[in-house]
Amino acid sequence: MNSSGTEHGLLVITGATGWVGRTAVYELQRSLLPEQFIERVRLFASRSGSILSTGYSDLAPFSIPVFSLKDLPDLAASESLSAILHTAFLTRDRVEQVGLDDYVATNRWITAQVASALTASPQARALVISSGAAAVHDQALGPDLASDPYGVLKWEEEQLLLSLLPTSLVLRLYALSGQFIREPSRFALGDFLLKALSNQPIRLDSPNPVLRSYANASDITTFAWRWLFKNNIDNPSNILAATSCTTNLFDLASLITRLYDLPPVQSTIDQAAVPNSYIAESEPFLIAMKKQNLVPMTMEQQVIDTAEGLTNSEHATHSR
């Protein structure tokens, strides 16, 4: 990985213990020698701890320190940062767990740590992992924080970080696949695969068709590193929907059923009903990937990759 200004400085990953963050660590290990990784990479999460390496198949896994995000601004002020891959954020489901006020305060604090680091390291390249939930607020006047705290806070973060570093890139994720899936039962793909791995039929209880745009976490983070290390920035936009294929969940369930030779899909879906749709056009991301000489996984490959993570103990989450 060579690019002007990115050969020697530190490489930062925030949210390093999460789904995208763990994948980003794994993909970076596939590009850096172990000694380079240890010397140059700094991982951050909500609290300090450690994770085990997963990207060096010829080495025994070794412990990688994870620093508290509160220490990121000091690091940026004292060391030269080359790149920040920012994935840290409390997900939508955490609102009910921590309450609206704490949820808002925590996510704005996370954003503030990254903003402080970018201010202290204006030479750094930055790529921000965001969400399709922010897209609805692009045209909204006075977005309502109480009705959609996750989407509004993601949108706010995008705007702030892009204003501080206009050359940064925001990737908006919609539906995700990949080996480091956490709490798989929370996600349709993960839930379907848990059923498949226990040889149970997949059941869809939604009355409406459900449409989702997927991309694989390894595809996304491989693209992110390629972009961060590239000499020339040639994106037509600073915000890109990171999706590579759109499917409906009945077809996804049918694909998994075929792959695992399961009993037929059980469904209550009325195909004539208005669909529940969380999708984005994939063409811009596919073009951007092609510019980086990357070919995204097909939906079948994404299913197989996610299943491998569920069955491969080496890729289980190791942290403390």
Image (cartoon, rainbow, N blue to C red):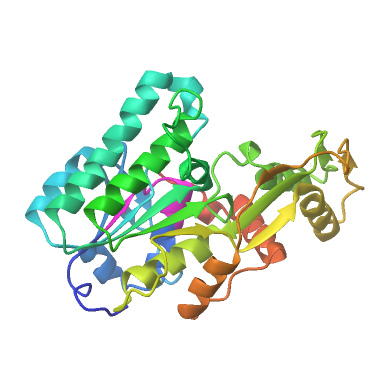
The spot of residue 187 in percent (x, y) is: 64, 41
The residues colored magenta run 12-23
Which residue is found at the position 46% from the left and 45% from the top? 138
Image vertical order of residue 159 relative to residue 146, above or below: below
71 part of magenta stretch? no
Q: Quadrant of the image for the C terminus?
A: top left
Query: Going by the image, does 86 lie left or right of 204?
Result: left
Residue 65 visible from this viewpoint: no
Q: Nearer the viewer, residue 145 or 186?
A: 145
- Number of numbered discs overlaid on the protein picture: 0
Query: Going by the image, does 131 lie left or right of 39?
Result: right
Q: Quadrant of residue 126?
A: bottom left
Q: Nearer the viewer, residue 208 or 74?
A: 208
Which residue is found at the position 79% from the left and 34% from the top? 206
Q: Nearer the viewer, residue 28 or 188?
A: 188
The spot of residue 159 in percent (x, y) is: 33, 47
Q: Quadrant of the image for the N terminus?
A: bottom left
The spot of residue 277 in percent (x, y) is: 69, 44
Q: Nearer the viewer, residue 18 or 315?
A: 18
Residue 100 visible from this viewpoint: yes
The residue positioned farthest toward the left in the image shown = 78
Image vertical order of residue 69 relative to residue 41, above or below: above
Query: Going by the image, does 161 lie left or right of 300?
Result: left
The spot of residue 203 in percent (x, y) is: 83, 38
16 part of magenta stretch? yes
Which residue is found at the position 15% from the left and 51% from the top? 119
